[in-house]
Image (cartoon, helix red, strand yellow):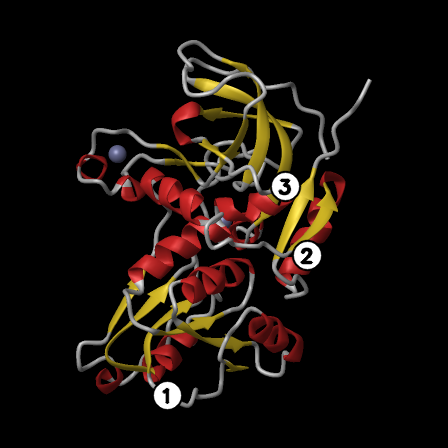
């Protein structure tokens, strides 16, 4: 814990009073040094829900008191070939909240207004926070998985619990792969409507059309390839993964493919924020006071969080 000065919003930025900030696996990769280019010192956290308290010059998207969400993508250049072709998620000089910009494990933060989003009214602050990354990256992963009916998911954490609800709304079947022997995770997945739940070492009864891997475990890539049928896709949804072991070409042949998902675009955020209340996506959250951020990270690291961990910042009343 440290006392920092309240940041000043630059032109185009809003000062946000943070109400809730979800804890993402990416925060763990940052804190554990697996992502090697953080701004230091750094305030982590990129699933921020708060209210606009002040703004810098030229802010026109929000008013004082508006509730906004801030995701991982915090700034893009608008000029590189990726930005110009609708792939701002791949921007050469993008900045990321809670990694190369200070984030939301704090009482206040500043954010570029163009990368802030209104939060659907039906969600509380804590319930909305996981939508900002688990939801957005999960949604992007689901789009990458294509439109096949039989969808496998490895790693049934925060992103999976949201994706499963969207996939069911789209009338797909969910096959959930959990840590071997994790009966509680299996029950959680079945409770969210999975038609099958098993260990990551098990084989489902049918060939799948696509699989999304949220667990940061490279070994799962060849395993997932073996579960998809011809033309099937394996989507790696995380920002970091342990090395992928070698595997025979035969499990990739027949037009199976492997791809990754990087970051998000503002369009993903707009689409998903409109979709979430229609499903309606319900987030299962375990809340912690801001002071217990390290405990929340430790629980996530050891697989003890069901759904999403969220830091809540109590508002001082005078
Ligand atoms: Zn760019
Ligand atoms: Zn995240």
C-alpha separation, residue under disc 3 versus residue under disc 1:
39 Å
Ligand 2 under 8 Å from disc 3 Cβ: no
User: Dot 3 lies on which element?
Assistant: loop
Q: Is residue 288 left or right of residue 59?
A: right
- Picture quarter with the N terminus: top right
Mark before the other along the chain sequence, 1 or 2: 1
Question: Which tag is nearer the camera, tag 2 or tag 3?
Answer: 3
Image quadrant where residue 273 sits: top left
Task: Identify which residue is drawn at 31% across, 43% down.
Answer: 89
Residue furthest to the right in view is 318
Number of numbered discs = 3
Q: Tell me the residue that label 2 is attached to.
A: 298
Q: Tell me the residue that label 1 is attached to.
A: 206
Q: Is residue 257 left or right of residue 165?
A: left
Q: Is residue 10 visible?
A: yes
Q: Is residue 208 left or right of residue 86?
A: right
Q: Tell me the residue that label 3 is attached to.
A: 124
User: Dot 2 lies on which element?
Assistant: helix
Quadrant of ligand 1: it is top left
- Picture quarter with the C terminus: top right
Q: Position of residue 310 (x, y in %)?
A: 65, 47
Question: Is residue 103 or residue 13 the one in the foreground?
Answer: 13
- Callout 2–callout 3 Cβ contact below 8 Å: no
């Amino acid at each position: 814990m440290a006392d920092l000065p309240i940041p000043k919003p630059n032109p185009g930025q809003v000062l946000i009073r943070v109400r809730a900030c979800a804890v993402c696996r990416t925060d763990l990769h940052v804190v554990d040094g697996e992502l090697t280019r953080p701004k230091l010192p750094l305030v982590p956290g990129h699933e921020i829900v708060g209210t606009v308290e002040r703004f810098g010059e030229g802010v026109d998207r929000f008013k004082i008191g508006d509730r906004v969400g801030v995701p991982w993508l915090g700034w893009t250049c608008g000029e590189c070939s990726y930005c110009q072709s609708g792939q701002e998620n791949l921007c050469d000089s993008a900045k990321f909240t809670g990694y190369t910009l200070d984030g939301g494990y704090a009482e206040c933060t500043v954010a570029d207004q163009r990368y802030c989003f209104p939060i659907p009214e039906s969600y509380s602050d804590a319930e909305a926070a996981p939508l900002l990354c688990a939801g957005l990256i999960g949604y992007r992963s689901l789009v990458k998985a294509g439109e096949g009916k039989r969808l496998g998911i490895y790693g049934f954490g925060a992103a999976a619990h949201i994706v499963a609800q969207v996939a069911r709304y789209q009338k797909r079947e969910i096959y959930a792969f959990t840590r071997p022997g994790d009966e509680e995770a299996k029950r959680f997945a079945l409770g969210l409507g999975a038609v099958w739940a098993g260990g990551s070492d098990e084989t489902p009864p049918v060939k799948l059309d696509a699989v999304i891997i949220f667990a940061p475990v490279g070994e799962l890539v060849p395993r997932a390839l073996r579960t998809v049928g011809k033309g099937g896709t394996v989507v790696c949804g995380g920002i970091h993964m342990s090395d992928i072991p070698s595997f025979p070409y035969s499990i990739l042949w027949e037009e199976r493919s492997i791809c990754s998902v990087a970051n998000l675009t503002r369009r993903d955020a707009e689409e998903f924020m409109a979709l979430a209340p229609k499903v309606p996506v319900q987030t299962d959250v375990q809340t912690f006071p801001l002071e217990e951020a390290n405990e929340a990270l430790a629980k996530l690291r050891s697989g003890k969080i069901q759904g999403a961990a969220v830091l809540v910042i109590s508002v001082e009343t005078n």
